[in-house]
Amino acid sequence: MPVRPHPFTFTCDRCGWKKTIAPRSDALGPGEWCDRCEHCGSTSLSFKTAGVIDRTLAQWFARLRR
């Protein structure tokens, strides 16, 4: 049975850039994964479960995009 993943946050280890993503389903769509920093281009990214504030904002913005 497919399960939607919890929102997660990417953080650049070089410049501190941060992006939180709230996937709409278990199949990730365009823009729901990062392989490099959008600010400095570094591929050194940390990946963790989103905090309460980041998660809430990401889910709210995801609903606006629908």
Image (spheres, rainbow, N blue to C red):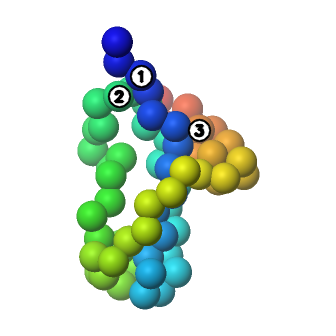
Q: Secondary structure at mark 1?
A: loop
Residue at x 35%, y 28% (from the top left corner): 26
Q: Amino acid at mark 2?
A: Asp
Mark 2 to mark 1 CA distance (whole Å) = 6 Å
Residue at x 28%, y 76% (from the top left corner): 43
Mark 1 burial class by Cα count in 10 Å: few <14, some 14-19, many 20+ = few
Tags 3 and 1 in contact by the CB under 8 Å rule?
A: no
State the image coordinates of residue 29 (x, y, percent, origin top left). 29, 38
In this rendered view, identify the residue nearer to me: 21 or 49: 49
Q: Amino acid at mark 1?
A: Val
In this rendered view, identify the residue nearer to me: 56 or 9: 9
Give the labeled residue for mark 2: 26
Q: Nearer the viewer, mark 2 or mark 3?
A: 2
Tags 2 and 1 in contact by the CB under 8 Å rule?
A: yes
Q: Earlier in the sequence, mark 3 or mark 1?
A: 1
Q: Nearer the viewer, mark 3 or mark 1?
A: 1
Say which quadrant the N terminus sits in.
top left
Give the labeled residue for mark 1: 3
Mark 2 to mark 3 CA distance (whole Å) = 15 Å
Tags 2 and 3 in contact by the CB under 8 Å rule?
A: no
State the image coordinates of residue 45 (x, y, percent, origin top left). 38, 71
Give the labeled residue for mark 3: 59
Q: Earlier in the sequence, mark 2 or mark 1?
A: 1
Q: Is residue 13 left or right of residue 51?
A: left
Q: Amino acid at mark 3?
A: Gln
State the image coordinates of residue 51 (x, y, percent, origin top left). 66, 53
Mark 3 to mark 1 CA distance (whole Å) = 16 Å
Can you say whether 47 is above or below 52 in the image? Answer: below
